[in-house]
Image: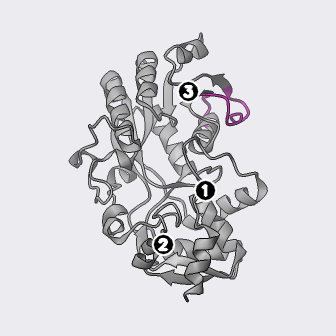
């Protein structure tokens, strides 16, 4: 079938395009054309999703039957896609757990039990929730929304796991949160990508929480894997939450994947029963970390998406925290 990936040149979208090719589809990507080329064998279509004329112009005579949308960041992008692609046989939309009004801290149970944002705020969660409604209103039971959690794997430009790998590889004493036993969950971009293509082929619909199984690892378990795989001699120096906050350490930003206790206690407790029922795989975490490290060592780091900053603990802040111990 003709499968259109909205996005498709970086991270998840790139893996979706690759998975669709491997499953025998005629694949096109629609991007602004500023973040590189899609995988070989893919039709590269270009345009700005916020421009209502761009998508129909780019598609011209190439009309998709299936769509996987990995790049919607604005309300206009969702409305424009709904106007042009409302007749496709299946549409899978990559949303976020942030679309839920009460997450974090959560916890998040079955998808139908939790309301999503309905406010007009120009923020990530409300925008994703509004995009879900806009597209679902047109596509109905041909629309699946994948509310993704933390995605890791090769081609990741966000650099959360990447920063930990680089910092741990340098070795020495490493500031870590005093929360190493806290459960976390992640999903490999390749697992999610292949699953999205399969879901749109099957015509699955509705909301699905698409992250790893709750409790699949701990913060410390992930960091230990990073140390093992990079071969570094890093020594953890746990620092209490109050001291980190007093030092100006920003949760999630300066120490990727770290959330304060009041949020973290339930933020990772996401019910993924439906995802598991629909066959979302979860490859061994060691494979995800090792493959990310191998890609990171062999490739130039991709540009950070617009509006984002590279994460990581500023060296001067780490030095001050280490000097106190």
Asked whether the residues under the numbered discs 1 and 3 touch, taking CB atoms below 8 Å apart as contact, a structural biologist would say: no
Residue 293 in the image: x percent, y percent? 68, 62
Task: Give the Cα distance between marks 1 and 3.
Answer: 27 Å
Name the residue carrying label 1: 159
218 w.r.t. 47: above or below: below
Q: What residue do we see at 55% from left, 47% from top?
A: 308
Q: Between 93 and 200, which is closer to the camera in this rendering?
A: 93
Q: Residues in magenta? A: 23-43
Left or right: residue 91 compared with residue 266: right
Looking at the rendered structure, the secondary structure element under dot 2 is: helix
Looking at the rendered structure, the secondary structure element under dot 3 is: strand
Asked whether the residues under the numbered discs 3 and 2 touch, taking CB atoms below 8 Å apart as contact, a structural biologist would say: no
> Of callouts 1 and 2, which one flags the residue occurring earlier in the amino acid sequence?
1
Seen from this angle, which residue lies furthest bottom? 325
Residue 107 in the image: x percent, y percent? 28, 60
Name the residue carrying label 3: 4
Q: What residue do we see at 28% from left, 58% from top?
A: 106
Name the residue carrying label 2: 219
132 w.r.t. 171: above or below: above
User: Which callout, 1 or 2, points to the residue nearer the camera?
Assistant: 1
Q: Is residue 68 visible?
A: yes
Quadrant in which the N terminus appears: top right
């Amino acid at each position: 079938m003709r499968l259109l990936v909205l996005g498709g040149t970086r991270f998840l979208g790139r893996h979706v395009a690759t998975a669709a090719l491997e499953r025998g589809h005629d694949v096109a990507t629609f991007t602004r054309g500023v973040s590189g080329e899609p995988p070989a064998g893919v039709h590269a279509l270009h345009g700005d999703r916020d421009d209502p004329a761009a998508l129909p112009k780019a598609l011209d005579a190439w009309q998709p039957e299936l769509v996987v949308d990995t790049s919607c960041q604005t309300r206009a992008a969702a409305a424009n896609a709904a106007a042009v692609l409302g007749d496709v046989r299946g549409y899978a939309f990559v949303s976020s757990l942030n679309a839920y009004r009460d997450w974090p801290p959560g916890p998040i149970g079955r998808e139908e039990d939790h309301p999503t944002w309905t406010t007009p705020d120009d923020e990530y969660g409300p925008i994703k929730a509004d995009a879900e409604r806009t597209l679902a209103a047109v596509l109905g039971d041909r629309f699946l929304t994948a509310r993704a959690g933390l995605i890791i794997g090769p081609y990741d430009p966000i650099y959360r796991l990447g920063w930990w790998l680089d910092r741990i590889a340098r070795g020495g004493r490493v500031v870590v949160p005093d929360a190493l036993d806290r459960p976390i969950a992640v999903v490999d971009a390749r697992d999610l990508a292949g699953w999205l293509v399969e879901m749109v082929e099957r015509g699955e619909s509705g909301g699905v929480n698409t992250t790893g199984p709750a409790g699949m690892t701990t913060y410390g378990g992930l960091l230990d894997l990073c140390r093992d795989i990079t071969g570094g001699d890093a020594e953890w120096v746990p620092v209490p939450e109050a001291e980190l906050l007093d030092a100006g350490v920003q949760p999630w930003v300066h120490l990727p994947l770290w959330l304060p206790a009041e949020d973290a206690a339930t933020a990772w407790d996401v019910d993924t029963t439906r995802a598991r029922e629909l066959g979302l795989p979860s490859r061994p975490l060691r494979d995800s970390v090792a493959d990310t490290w191998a890609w990171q060592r062999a490739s130039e780091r991709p540009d950070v998406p617009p509006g984002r900053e590279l994460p990581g603990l500023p060296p001067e802040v780490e030095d001050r925290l280490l000097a106190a111990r």
